[in-house]
Image: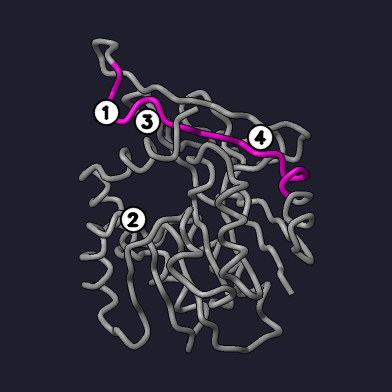
Amino acid sequence: MVSAEKVKEQYLSDKHFHYHESQFKEPKRSTIALCNFVSKILSAKKESYKAVDICCGGGGNIYHLSKALPGSTWVGVDFADKFFSIARKHLPDETKYKFTKGDLYKLKEAFPAKSFDIAFLIQTATWLPGYESAVKKIMGIAKKWIFITSLFSDFKVDVFAEVVEYKDDWSAMEDSPYNYNIYSLGKFKEFCLRNGAKEVIAEDFNIDIDLPIPENKVMGTYTIKSGDGTRLQFSGAMFMPWKMIAVRLE
């Protein structure tokens, strides 16, 4: 299993600048689905929230989620503050958006207990060695809800996978190996409830567009239609069961 420190090192690659910038030009289908999921969960509560996006990168998710939660204030946290230049360019209002360097595993040292109404951990948990330590840290600073997107299955199975991508000469590509974990949803729910959560709500992310297989035959999302017309997401040789999770804390 690739360690948390190695995950950080991989994430610092300059190649990620393009990804973070692209998030502002057109929202990913997963981002649109997450905004709809959050709006649905919080539809009965027309409130303004104090929200934090942990591992926020260049702030693209905050940009789109802030439209779903108008009037809320946001803090973006990431140890890779090199990407904050992108966030501040697109989100210049410092009364509404703040970005601060911080460590996912040291949130208690950075923020007072229960200092945010809502916390987000978006497409991050699957790359970690495991979710338990990270989620416990987030529970310490969130009061009402935690929203998580990651790979979860409905089976009583955790899959801890390391991915190695290869160049044409079969040498390992930059950043290989890296984690690509699929967690048991049932076990995750039990973990959250045991640690004080009141409810865990899960919804599949079913993509609504066709994606071709990458020509270079390395990792990259593509879709295959099942017999009932559902688009199944794959990357390389792996099935990608993305889910959106809402953890209610009060």
What residue type is disc 4 on? Ser
Instruction: Give residue 117's quadrant in the image.
Output: bottom right
Residue at the spot 20% in from the left edge and 65% down from the top edge: 85
Secondary structure, mark 2, is loop
Please identify, in this view, whether the residue under mark 3 or under mark 2 is nearer the observer: 2
Residue 66 image offset from top left, x and y in percent:
45, 77
What residue type is disc 2 on? Phe
Please identify, in this view, whether the residue under mark 3 or under mark 4 is nearer the observer: 3
Q: Along the polypeptide, which appears first: circle 2 or circle 4? A: 2
- State which quarter of the image contains the C terminus: bottom right
Residue at the spot 32% in from the left edge and 44% down from the top edge: 11
Up/down of 164 relative to 113, above or below? above
Q: Compute the Cα span from label 2 to label 1.
A: 20 Å
Q: Along the polypeptide, which appears first: circle 4 or circle 1? A: 1
Instruction: Give residue 227's quadrant in the image.
Output: top right
Asked if the residues shown at circle 3 and circle 2 are in contact, with their CB atoms under 8 angstroms apart, the answer is no
Residue occupied by mark 1: 174
Residue occupied by mark 3: 214
Instruction: Please state which of residues 201 and 31 is positioned toward the viewer in this rendering.
Output: 201
Task: Sort mark 1 into few (<14), some (14-19) or many (20+) by Cα contacts within 10 Å.
Answer: few
Residue occupied by mark 2: 79
Task: Sort mark 2 into few (<14), some (14-19) or many (20+) by Cα contacts within 10 Å.
Answer: some
Residue 141 image offset from top left, x and y in percent:
56, 69
Instruction: Please state which of residues 155 and 36 is positioned toward the viewer in this rendering.
Output: 155
Q: Compute the Cα span from label 3 to label 4.
A: 19 Å
